[in-house]
Amino acid sequence: MKIDTLMAPAPPNVLREQAAQLEAQGFDCIWTFEAMSDPFIPLAHAAAATSKIEIGTNIAVAFARSPFSMAQIAWDLQRDSGGRFHLGLGTQVRAHVERRFSADFDHPAARIVDYIKCLRAIWDCFQNGSKPSYDGRFYKFKLMNPFFNPGPLDHPSIPVYLAGVNARMCRAAGEAADGFHVHPMHSPGYVRDIIKPSIAEGAKLVGRDPSSVALYAPVFTITGDTQAQFDEMERTVRGQISFYGSTPSYSAVLEYHGYPDLGRQLNTLMREGKVKEMAAAIPDALLEHLAVIGKPSEIGNIMRARSEGLLDRVSLYSSMGSDGHFSKWSELISAIHT
């Protein structure tokens, strides 16, 4: 199993210093995310400051960019990192895609499969000079000339990860992706009973081996060197779970664990601005399913036992390097790598 980490936006000198530190600590991959900042620029700095650690997006919003635009930036990062880049894509939700990015969202699962196939056709053109002839349901790639072709790479195979929660997006990953970004709001049971079987269904449609789809998950973690730190992390994780749970996209996780009405309750509290009440509404039993809870020295072993046989790579959610209330990084890395 691999142990990864997340890296937040920061000034270039900080990003380079942090990336070098993460590589020295023994992490396997640095992931960035698209929220207030572009997810690709930090990875360019990370690539320049390191030589071994993998880099990737978790996630970049696919529908906000054309396949050709996405193919170009991925090709650049794969070249500049010497083959260490992973392209993690997500569909986002309709409201943001249509009203924030001014893009199309209809049939998101079918659209993202078409998007990934178009990406691969573009990369094949870059690498092998193949004729641009992709004609999909949503995307097309039919025009190229040498002026716009960056040419071949020594490491042309770019793993594409797809993020999702519900069964339909898991099937899309099985059909078209190399990896799947499991949302931090997950449990071992949900991965075992919903995510992996759905990926297998998608893989079966196209004759793929479902085990070829690697699973990576950031994991909600509650720990601390002091009780005050522990309590603070618990409040934070409860807040994160309640925020995600208030969105219909995550209702399947709540329903799986026997809380079919909790999502509507959280959504009502959200609309009323009752943030503290939202966090308080998360049952202790649900928290124990969705988070790793323990002393800092125990977290690595707990996480490994929780994830072994289900996930290929893990990270602490929202932990960047040595920041936050976690002091046992070497023990964590050693436990996951054992």
Image (cartoon, rainbow, N blue to C red):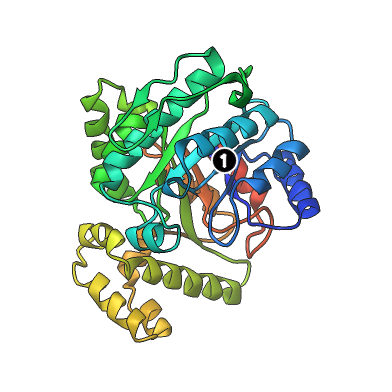
Q: Is residue 195 visible?
A: no
Q: Quadrant of residue 210?
A: top left
| Residue located at (30% from left, 47% from top) | 108
Place of residue 147 in the rendered image (x, y in percent of width and height, measured from the top left): 63, 23
Q: Is residue 95 above or below residue 169?
A: below
- 184, 25: nearer the viewer: 184
Q: Residue at x 27, y 28 (%)?
A: 203
The image position of residue 223, as x and y in percent, is: 54, 64
Along the viewing direction, whichever of 288 and 76 lies nearer the viewer: 76
Give amino acid for label 1. Answer: Gly
Q: Is residue 42 left or right of residue 296?
A: right
Q: Which element is circle 1 on?
A: strand
Q: Position of residue 259 (x, y in %)?
A: 21, 67
Picture quarter with the C terminus: top right
Which residue corresponds to mark 1? 56
Q: Is residue 72 above or below residue 95?
A: above
Number of marks: 1
- Give left or right: position of 10 versus 139: right
